[in-house]
Image (tube, rainbow, N blue to C red):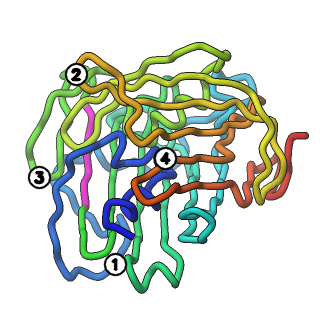
Amino acid sequence: MTDFAMRRLLPLLVLATALFAPGTSRAESEADLGSAADVSPNVGASVTATDGPVASISDSSPHSSLRIGETLNFQIKWGVVPAGTATMSITEAKEVSGRPCLHVVATAVSNPVFDKVYPVRDQFESFMDSSDLRSWAFKKHLREGKFRRDQVVRSDHAAGKAYYHDGNSYDLTPGAYDVLSAFYYVRTLPLVDGDEYFLDSHSDKKNYPIRVTVHRRERVSVPAGTFDCVVVEPTLRSGDFFKNEGSLTIWLTDDERRMPVQMKSKIPVGSISVELESFERPGIEKAGSAVR
Protein backbone atom coordinates (compact mmCIF):
# COMPACT_ATOMS: atom_id res chain seq x y z
CA MET A 1 0.00 0.00 0.00
CA THR A 2 1.29 3.46 -0.85
CA ASP A 3 2.05 6.24 1.62
CA PHE A 4 -0.85 8.21 0.17
CA ALA A 5 -3.29 5.37 0.76
CA MET A 6 -2.23 4.92 4.37
CA ARG A 7 -2.47 8.65 5.08
CA ARG A 8 -6.05 8.62 3.75
CA LEU A 9 -6.99 5.41 5.53
CA LEU A 10 -6.69 6.18 9.22
CA PRO A 11 -7.41 9.91 9.46
CA LEU A 12 -10.63 9.38 7.46
CA LEU A 13 -12.61 9.50 10.68
CA VAL A 14 -11.86 13.17 11.11
CA LEU A 15 -13.15 14.05 7.65
CA ALA A 16 -10.06 12.89 5.81
CA THR A 17 -7.42 15.50 6.61
CA ALA A 18 -5.91 14.93 3.18
CA LEU A 19 -9.26 15.94 1.64
CA PHE A 20 -9.96 19.06 3.71
CA ALA A 21 -6.34 20.15 4.10
CA PRO A 22 -4.37 19.24 0.98
CA GLY A 23 -0.75 20.06 0.40
CA THR A 24 0.74 19.48 3.86
CA SER A 25 4.51 19.08 3.78
CA ARG A 26 6.38 16.19 5.36
CA ALA A 27 9.17 16.34 7.92
CA GLU A 28 10.87 13.15 9.03
CA SER A 29 12.25 12.47 12.48
CA GLU A 30 12.81 9.55 14.81
CA ALA A 31 10.70 10.96 17.64
CA ASP A 32 8.81 8.42 19.73
CA LEU A 33 5.07 8.05 19.30
CA GLY A 34 3.42 10.13 21.99
CA SER A 35 0.32 12.09 22.89
CA ALA A 36 -0.83 15.56 21.95
CA ALA A 37 -0.32 16.57 25.57
CA ASP A 38 3.42 16.70 24.83
CA VAL A 39 2.95 19.79 22.66
CA SER A 40 3.92 23.09 24.30
CA PRO A 41 2.90 25.81 21.86
CA ASN A 42 3.82 29.45 22.32
CA VAL A 43 0.45 30.81 21.30
CA GLY A 44 -0.70 32.56 24.44
CA ALA A 45 -2.61 31.62 27.55
CA SER A 46 -5.94 32.01 25.79
CA VAL A 47 -5.38 28.68 24.05
CA THR A 48 -5.29 26.84 27.37
CA ALA A 49 -8.69 25.73 28.60
CA THR A 50 -9.61 26.66 32.15
CA ASP A 51 -10.61 24.06 34.71
CA GLY A 52 -14.21 23.19 35.46
CA PRO A 53 -17.37 22.83 33.40
CA VAL A 54 -18.67 26.08 31.96
CA ALA A 55 -21.08 24.92 29.27
CA SER A 56 -23.82 22.37 28.86
CA ILE A 57 -25.74 20.67 26.09
CA SER A 58 -29.33 19.70 26.88
CA ASP A 59 -32.18 18.03 25.01
CA SER A 60 -33.76 21.45 24.48
CA SER A 61 -30.57 22.89 22.99
CA PRO A 62 -30.25 23.50 19.23
CA HIS A 63 -27.37 21.03 19.52
CA SER A 64 -29.20 18.27 21.39
CA SER A 65 -27.54 15.76 19.04
CA LEU A 66 -24.29 16.47 20.92
CA ARG A 67 -23.77 15.32 24.50
CA ILE A 68 -20.82 15.67 26.84
CA GLY A 69 -19.52 12.17 27.48
CA GLU A 70 -20.56 10.82 24.09
CA THR A 71 -17.97 8.33 22.85
CA LEU A 72 -18.03 6.73 19.41
CA ASN A 73 -15.74 3.80 18.62
CA PHE A 74 -15.00 2.78 15.03
CA GLN A 75 -13.23 0.06 13.09
CA ILE A 76 -11.29 1.03 9.96
CA LYS A 77 -10.84 -1.20 6.92
CA TRP A 78 -8.90 -1.10 3.68
CA GLY A 79 -11.21 -3.08 1.44
CA VAL A 80 -12.17 -6.00 3.68
CA VAL A 81 -8.90 -5.95 5.63
CA PRO A 82 -9.01 -4.55 9.20
CA ALA A 83 -6.49 -1.70 9.46
CA GLY A 84 -7.10 0.09 12.74
CA THR A 85 -9.50 1.72 15.16
CA ALA A 86 -10.66 5.25 15.84
CA THR A 87 -12.62 7.13 18.48
CA MET A 88 -14.48 10.42 18.69
CA SER A 89 -15.39 11.83 22.11
CA ILE A 90 -16.99 14.95 23.54
CA THR A 91 -14.95 14.93 26.72
CA GLU A 92 -15.93 18.03 28.69
CA ALA A 93 -16.91 21.70 28.67
CA LYS A 94 -14.12 24.25 28.98
CA GLU A 95 -13.51 27.96 28.52
CA VAL A 96 -11.23 29.13 25.71
CA SER A 97 -10.62 32.75 24.74
CA GLY A 98 -13.34 33.72 27.20
CA ARG A 99 -15.92 31.54 25.46
CA PRO A 100 -17.65 28.39 26.76
CA CYS A 101 -16.49 25.53 24.57
CA LEU A 102 -16.91 21.81 24.08
CA HIS A 103 -13.67 19.85 24.05
CA VAL A 104 -13.70 17.16 21.36
CA VAL A 105 -10.97 14.54 20.90
CA ALA A 106 -10.56 12.18 17.93
CA THR A 107 -7.90 9.48 17.62
CA ALA A 108 -6.87 7.01 14.93
CA VAL A 109 -4.58 4.03 15.65
CA SER A 110 -3.33 1.34 13.28
CA ASN A 111 -3.64 -2.30 14.34
CA PRO A 112 -0.59 -4.53 15.07
CA VAL A 113 -0.46 -5.90 11.51
CA PHE A 114 -0.37 -2.45 9.90
CA ASP A 115 2.01 -1.22 12.61
CA LYS A 116 4.72 -3.37 11.02
CA VAL A 117 4.40 -1.47 7.74
CA TYR A 118 3.02 1.96 8.61
CA PRO A 119 2.30 2.68 12.30
CA VAL A 120 -0.23 5.43 12.93
CA ARG A 121 -0.96 7.27 16.18
CA ASP A 122 -2.98 10.38 15.35
CA GLN A 123 -4.85 12.65 17.73
CA PHE A 124 -6.94 15.72 16.98
CA GLU A 125 -8.51 18.09 19.52
CA SER A 126 -11.03 20.85 18.94
CA PHE A 127 -12.32 23.47 21.35
CA MET A 128 -15.55 24.51 19.66
CA ASP A 129 -17.97 27.18 20.80
CA SER A 130 -20.88 25.60 22.67
CA SER A 131 -23.26 28.00 20.93
CA ASP A 132 -22.39 27.96 17.23
CA LEU A 133 -19.63 25.29 17.23
CA ARG A 134 -17.05 27.50 15.50
CA SER A 135 -13.46 26.67 16.40
CA TRP A 136 -11.54 28.65 19.02
CA ALA A 137 -8.55 26.32 19.28
CA PHE A 138 -7.37 23.21 17.47
CA LYS A 139 -4.57 20.73 18.17
CA LYS A 140 -3.17 18.14 15.79
CA HIS A 141 -0.68 15.43 16.80
CA LEU A 142 0.30 13.20 13.87
CA ARG A 143 2.52 10.13 13.96
CA GLU A 144 2.28 8.32 10.62
CA GLY A 145 5.23 6.13 9.68
CA LYS A 146 8.21 8.49 9.83
CA PHE A 147 6.01 11.54 9.37
CA ARG A 148 5.73 13.75 12.47
CA ARG A 149 3.65 16.86 12.99
CA ASP A 150 2.45 18.74 16.06
CA GLN A 151 0.30 21.79 15.50
CA VAL A 152 -1.73 24.13 17.68
CA VAL A 153 -3.94 26.90 16.30
CA ARG A 154 -5.85 29.64 18.12
CA SER A 155 -8.65 31.36 16.23
CA ASP A 156 -9.42 35.06 16.65
CA HIS A 157 -12.68 35.50 14.79
CA ALA A 158 -12.99 39.21 15.54
CA ALA A 159 -9.57 39.92 14.04
CA GLY A 160 -9.94 37.34 11.26
CA LYS A 161 -6.65 35.70 12.20
CA ALA A 162 -5.48 32.17 13.00
CA TYR A 163 -2.42 32.12 15.29
CA TYR A 164 -0.12 29.11 14.99
CA HIS A 165 2.27 27.64 17.54
CA ASP A 166 5.30 28.74 15.50
CA GLY A 167 4.41 32.40 16.03
CA ASN A 168 2.98 33.00 12.57
CA SER A 169 -0.55 34.15 11.85
CA TYR A 170 -2.75 33.66 8.80
CA ASP A 171 -6.03 35.03 7.50
CA LEU A 172 -9.08 33.34 8.98
CA THR A 173 -12.62 33.48 7.65
CA PRO A 174 -14.59 34.68 10.72
CA GLY A 175 -16.77 31.89 12.07
CA ALA A 176 -14.70 29.17 10.39
CA TYR A 177 -14.67 25.60 11.68
CA ASP A 178 -11.72 23.26 12.02
CA VAL A 179 -11.93 19.73 10.56
CA LEU A 180 -13.45 18.36 13.77
CA SER A 181 -15.89 21.13 14.63
CA ALA A 182 -17.08 21.11 10.99
CA PHE A 183 -17.96 17.45 11.39
CA TYR A 184 -19.95 18.10 14.58
CA TYR A 185 -21.65 21.15 13.06
CA VAL A 186 -22.96 19.03 10.18
CA ARG A 187 -24.57 16.75 12.78
CA THR A 188 -26.75 19.67 13.97
CA LEU A 189 -28.16 20.54 10.52
CA PRO A 190 -31.71 19.56 9.44
CA LEU A 191 -30.27 17.56 6.48
CA VAL A 192 -33.19 17.60 4.06
CA ASP A 193 -32.86 15.34 1.00
CA GLY A 194 -31.55 17.29 -1.99
CA ASP A 195 -30.43 20.27 0.08
CA GLU A 196 -26.91 21.69 0.09
CA TYR A 197 -25.24 23.37 3.05
CA PHE A 198 -22.18 25.60 2.89
CA LEU A 199 -19.63 26.29 5.61
CA ASP A 200 -16.14 27.71 5.96
CA SER A 201 -13.24 25.76 7.44
CA HIS A 202 -9.62 26.57 8.24
CA SER A 203 -6.81 24.03 8.19
CA ASP A 204 -3.05 24.16 7.71
CA LYS A 205 -2.87 27.94 7.22
CA LYS A 206 -5.63 28.12 4.60
CA ASN A 207 -9.38 28.68 4.42
CA TYR A 208 -11.47 26.02 2.69
CA PRO A 209 -15.16 26.55 1.78
CA ILE A 210 -17.05 23.25 2.05
CA ARG A 211 -20.31 22.13 0.50
CA VAL A 212 -22.31 19.34 2.15
CA THR A 213 -24.85 17.62 -0.12
CA VAL A 214 -27.70 15.53 1.31
CA HIS A 215 -28.33 12.60 -1.04
CA ARG A 216 -30.87 10.17 0.39
CA ARG A 217 -32.12 8.05 3.30
CA GLU A 218 -31.23 4.37 3.66
CA ARG A 219 -30.77 1.63 6.23
CA VAL A 220 -27.28 0.25 6.91
CA SER A 221 -25.88 -2.47 9.16
CA VAL A 222 -22.56 -2.06 10.98
CA PRO A 223 -21.01 -3.84 13.99
CA ALA A 224 -22.91 -1.51 16.38
CA GLY A 225 -26.27 -2.47 14.89
CA THR A 226 -28.73 -1.57 12.14
CA PHE A 227 -29.52 2.10 11.65
CA ASP A 228 -31.78 4.26 9.51
CA CYS A 229 -29.42 6.88 8.08
CA VAL A 230 -29.18 10.07 6.06
CA VAL A 231 -26.39 9.99 3.47
CA VAL A 232 -24.29 13.14 3.03
CA GLU A 233 -21.25 14.04 0.96
CA PRO A 234 -18.83 16.87 1.79
CA THR A 235 -16.89 18.44 -1.07
CA LEU A 236 -14.10 20.99 -1.07
CA ARG A 237 -14.06 24.11 -3.21
CA SER A 238 -11.06 24.57 -5.49
CA GLY A 239 -11.06 27.93 -7.24
CA ASP A 240 -14.60 28.60 -8.43
CA PHE A 241 -15.70 24.98 -8.34
CA PHE A 242 -16.48 22.33 -5.75
CA LYS A 243 -14.62 19.10 -6.46
CA ASN A 244 -15.43 15.57 -5.34
CA GLU A 245 -11.79 14.68 -4.71
CA GLY A 246 -11.71 11.60 -2.52
CA SER A 247 -15.48 11.03 -2.92
CA LEU A 248 -16.08 10.87 0.83
CA THR A 249 -19.57 9.64 1.79
CA ILE A 250 -20.91 9.73 5.35
CA TRP A 251 -23.93 7.95 6.87
CA LEU A 252 -25.48 9.72 9.90
CA THR A 253 -28.35 8.30 11.95
CA ASP A 254 -31.66 9.71 10.76
CA ASP A 255 -32.76 10.84 14.22
CA GLU A 256 -31.94 13.52 16.78
CA ARG A 257 -28.55 11.89 17.52
CA ARG A 258 -27.09 12.26 14.01
CA MET A 259 -24.33 9.82 14.95
CA PRO A 260 -21.81 8.93 12.23
CA VAL A 261 -22.40 5.26 11.51
CA GLN A 262 -20.35 4.69 8.38
CA MET A 263 -17.88 6.54 6.13
CA LYS A 264 -16.50 5.41 2.79
CA SER A 265 -13.97 6.78 0.33
CA LYS A 266 -12.33 5.47 -2.83
CA ILE A 267 -8.56 5.73 -3.19
CA PRO A 268 -6.17 4.83 -6.05
CA VAL A 269 -5.60 1.37 -4.56
CA GLY A 270 -9.11 0.35 -3.56
CA SER A 271 -11.47 1.76 -0.97
CA ILE A 272 -11.44 2.57 2.71
CA SER A 273 -14.29 2.46 5.18
CA VAL A 274 -15.01 3.39 8.76
CA GLU A 275 -17.84 1.63 10.63
CA LEU A 276 -19.32 2.33 14.05
CA GLU A 277 -18.39 -0.51 16.39
CA SER A 278 -19.85 0.75 19.67
CA PHE A 279 -21.02 3.96 21.28
CA GLU A 280 -22.07 5.49 24.57
CA ARG A 281 -24.22 8.52 25.30
CA PRO A 282 -24.29 8.99 29.10
CA GLY A 283 -27.71 8.94 30.67
CA ILE A 284 -29.34 7.71 27.49
CA GLU A 285 -27.87 4.59 25.94
CA LYS A 286 -24.75 2.48 25.63
CA ALA A 287 -22.86 0.44 23.06
CA GLY A 288 -24.88 -1.70 20.71
CA SER A 289 -28.14 0.28 20.74
CA ALA A 290 -29.61 0.69 17.30
CA VAL A 291 -32.44 2.43 15.50
CA ARG A 292 -34.66 -0.01 13.63
**Mark 1–mark 2 distance (CA, rounded to whole Å):** 37 Å
Amino acid type shown at disc 2: Gly
Task: Name which of mark 4 and mark 1 comes first in the sequence.
Answer: 1
1 or 3: mark nearer the eye: 1
Give the label on residue 239, or none.
2
**Looking at the image, do the residues carrying marks 4 and 2 touch, with CB atoms under 8 Å apart?**
no
Q: Is residue 131 above or below residue 203?
A: above
Q: How far is the residue under mark 3 from the one under mark 2? A: 28 Å
Q: Which amino acid type is marked by label 3?
A: Asp
Q: Residues within 10 Å of mark 2 (few under 14, many from 20)?
A: few
Residue 23 % position (x, y) = 20, 47
Q: Amino acid at mark 4?
A: His
Q: Which residues are magenta?
A: 150-155
Which quadrant of the figure has residue 155?
top left
Please name which of the two marks, 4 or 2, marks the residue nearer to the observer: 2
Give the residue at mark 1: 33
> Which is more N-terminal, label 3 or label 1?
1
Residue 177 percent coordinates (x, y): 38, 31
**Callout 1–callout 2 Cβ contact below 8 Å:** no
The residue mark sitting in front, 3 or 2, is 2
Q: Which residue is mark 4?
A: 103
Task: Name the residue rendered at 35%, 64% in the picture.
Answer: 36
Report the mark closest to the observer, 4 or 1.
Answer: 1
| Horizontal side of residue 55 vs 208, given as left or right | right
Disc on the earlier residue, 4 or 3: 4
Image quadrant holding the C terminus, namely top right
Tell me, for residue 166, which label it has, or none.
3
Callout 1: SS: loop
Q: Quadrant of residue 291?
A: top right
CB contact under 8 Å: marks 1 and 3:
no
